[in-house]
Amino acid sequence: MFVTFEGGEGVGKSTQIRLLAGALEAHGHAVRITREPGGSAGAEAVRHVILSGAAESYGVRMEALLFAAARSDHVETVIRPALETGSVVLCDRFMDSSRVYQGITGNLPERLIDGLERVAINGLRPDITIILDMPAAEGLARARSRASQSADVASAVPDRFEKEELETHEKRREAFLDIAARDPGRCRIVDASRAVDLIAADVLSAVEAVISERQAGKVTA
Ligand code: TYD
């Protein structure tokens, strides 16, 4: 069972991942939490290059290739092996972030994004993708207040993508909603501007529904 979390800046993905992991573990599931860009040794090295802005001057295409390289390493060395041992894998961002950030707001052709995605995921599609949705201004305000309270110097500085204009963030929100509309079998939109426990309850029931479907499928197969 491979679960990905997507959405704009500051929508609360990491909190929801932590709560979902706790709930699934309480139900006896082994859970592996991971994130992108990063999640494996090779991909974490690439993460630093991208988020520091070191690759920005080489252009969006170069960044998209780096995200794809990082994703490929992450899929083959961490995600696929964890799934093979029966763990539920919860991943903070995955292929839809490349579609939105590099494809839609980076203006790269869909054909290029599709090709990179095919190589990077190598057949490993999420069983379910939770899209945490809230107005971009609200998410950005949260991300910025989190950064200003952080004692960690690295997270107090807006990264390469956080520093972009509100209009760009709003476009990304629309792009995530559009992905969900095109792929309703995989994606669930969850209203993330509510209380944390209400969001967590929706996330858990969406994921449990897919787990039960899978178990029913296995029994009848
Ligand atoms: P991160 O610090 O993990 O932030 P967040 O809490 O928003 O996930 O930074 C990841 C940044 O990288 C984020 O701004 C989105 C961007 N990104 C892409 O542009 N393309 C991708 O494929 C991925 C995975 C992330």
Image (cartoon, helix red, strand yellow):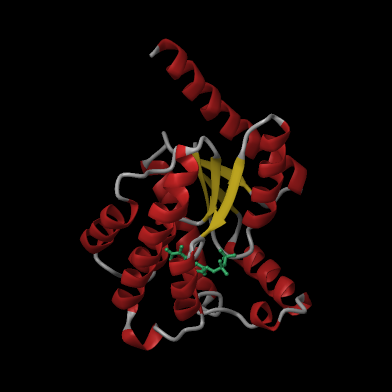
Query: On screen, 9 above or below 164?
Result: above
Horizontal relation, residue 29 to residue 36: left or right: right
For the point 47% across and 84% down, the residue is 53
For the point 68% across and 80% down, the residue is 156
The image position of residue 54, as x and y in percent, is: 44, 86
For the point 54% across and 73% down, the residue is 166
The image position of residue 14, as x and y in percent, is: 65, 56
Q: How many marks?
A: 0
- Frontmost residue, 80 versus 147: 80
Horizontal relation, residue 210 to residue 98: left or right: right
Q: Residue furthest top?
A: 220
For the point 32% across and 57% down, the residue is 120
- Frontmost residue, 204 versus 220: 220
Quarter holding residue 10: bottom right
Q: Is residue 219 visible?
A: yes
Query: On screen, 73 above or below 17?
Result: below
The image position of residue 174, as x and y in percent, is: 46, 56
Q: Is residue 187 visible?
A: no
Query: On screen, 49 above or below 179?
Result: below
Query: On screen, 210 above or below 146?
Result: above
The C terminus, quarter of image: top left
Horizontal relation, residue 214 to residue 150: left or right: left
The image position of residue 70, as x and y in percent, is: 40, 65
